[in-house]
Structures are given as C-alpha cells and as structure tokens.
Amino acid sequence: MSAAPDEVPIALPEEAVQADPVDASTAPPVVLVDPATGCSPYPPVTPTSPPVVDEVGAWHRLLDLMARSPERAVLGIAGAPGAGKTTYADYLAGCWFDATVVGMDGFHLAQSALTRLGRSARKGAPDTFDVVGYLTLLRRIRRPGDETVWAPEFRRDLEDPIAAVVPIRPSTRLVITEGNYLLLPEGPWAQAREFCDEVWYVEVPERVRVARLVARHEAYGRSRAQARARATVGVDAENAELIATTRARADVVVTLSMAEEEM
C-alpha cells in the first residue's frame, strides 16, 4: 500500500528489523528512583507488571468499566495494610451515584473465636478470616436479585465485625470490595478474584504506609513502641510482605496521592 501524501515512509536499519524479540521473563526490572533519597519508594516495575496509573487515570478506567457493564459491576481494591484501601474505596463510592463499599474486614473471625483458636496475636493473617463466608457474599452480589443483600462491617473501636450493617440494594450499580487478600492465589482466597470485574492494587511509598499504620494502632490504644513493632516486624509486616507478592496479579496498580504533611 502506498503512503498517504502527508506521511513520510521510515526506513528501519536492517539490524533493527532482524533484532530478536525481548524475553520479558529475563528482562531487567525498571526501577523508579526518588531523586530526593536516591531510592525507589515503589517495587521494581518489570515488563510483565500491570500498568501503573495515578488517581485520574484510575477514574477514567472506572468510567470505562461502568460503560461496559450492563448491570452491576464489582471492583476489587487490594493492597497492604495502611496503603489507603478503605479511604480510596469510600472516595470512589462517594463519587458514584449508586455505589456501595463492602470491606473484607467484615469477615474477620470474632475476637473470642480467635482466642479459642490460638490466633489472636495473628489477627489479620489469611487464616483469621471467614473466607468461605466472604466468597458466598461475593457470589450473591454478582447475581443481583429483587432483595437487598446485607453485608457485615468491621468496627475498629470494638475490634470485631458487626453483622448485617451494609445494604447492597437491587439497584446498586457498583460494588467496591476492598481487602488485603483479593489477589492471593492460594486456597479458597483464589476464588475472590473471579467474582470481580477488575482488581486494583493501591500503594503509597513504604515510609508513608508504615507511618499511617503506626498512627492507626496508636489511635486505638497501643503504645508507640507496640504500634511500631506491629507495623514493622509483627503480623502487619508479615501480611504486607505476603500481599506485595500478589501485586503482579492486579489489573492495574494505582499510586494514591498523599496528604501534604506526608510528603
């Protein structure tokens, strides 16, 4: 086919035409460096990583998701503790005319149950949730009927879930479910991904995430030392390491904005 009048044919060098394709599995990662510190605040980005967008790009992606969803859409928000999952999910829901947020934390086992099972100190780990109950709720959400579905909610002031607090009405167009383990590929957790149209992985620089987590634990009664230990070497740190391994399974990574005092 001849080139259009306004087009200039480009002749590629022979070596460029004959170059072997890049093997994504062996290509070196691309590391984003913070000029102020000389370090990367985010995990390395490899050619097989999901796309990374800011909140504006994520909003356009949500608009596209809703446009191609004739009925109800289910959006998952995953990320490490302190990354801002709940705040971001609530923000997105508040921007939409008919949206509901369902938190995975509502399926924490009760504190009394964790004590009986000897898992109280590990609260927040994958085996401290009623994963089957969560999957059952997601299945009901995916099949909207004529009745309101009620979801539980986690109360941090009580450190326990409360049943039947969040209504998902038949008319609800967007359900946002947020939690740590939406992208976990092992065991029953692997099914959670299947009930979502998309799952986004949210992140902020590590220093900001840890500082938020420490502040959260202090706000609910832990000493500064206890809060920092839990966030940096305790169960929260262990869970964050596990969750970070699921980042590559997300449809997109969203870098969240920070408050001015966090910069």
Image (tube, rainbow, N blue to C red):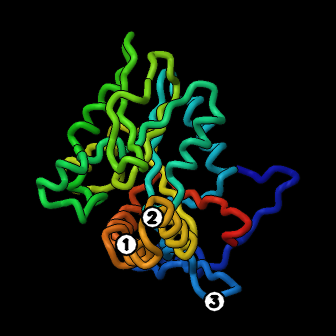
Q: Secondary structure at mark 2?
A: helix
Q: Is any atom of residue 161 visible in this view?
A: yes
Q: Secondary structure at mark 3?
A: loop
Q: Secondary structure at mark 1?
A: helix
* Residue at the disc numbered 3: 38
Residue found at the far top of this picture:
146
**Which residue is rendered at x = 25% and y = 56% of the image?**
126
> Which amino acid, mark 1?
Arg
> Which amino acid, mark 3?
Gly
Nearest to the eye among marks 3 and 2: give it: 2
Q: Position of residue 174 (x, y in %)?
A: 51, 30
The span from disc 2 to disc 1 (Cα, nearest Å) is 8 Å
**Which residue is rendered at x = 53% and y = 63% of the image?**
203
The span from disc 3 to disc 2 (Cα, nearest Å) is 30 Å
The span from disc 1 to disc 3 (Cα, nearest Å) is 27 Å
Q: Is residue 28 left or right of residue 107?
A: right
**Which residue is rendered at x = 17% and y = 56% of the image?**
115
Q: Position of residue 165 (x, y in %)?
A: 40, 29
* Residue at the disc numbered 1: 230
Q: Position of residue 62 (x, y in %)?
A: 59, 40
* Residue at the disc numbered 2: 217
Mark before the other along the chain sequence, 3 or 2: 3
> Which amino acid, mark 2?
His
Q: Is residue 235 left or right of residue 224?
A: left
Residue found at the far bottom of this picture:
38
Q: Which mark is residue 129?
A: none
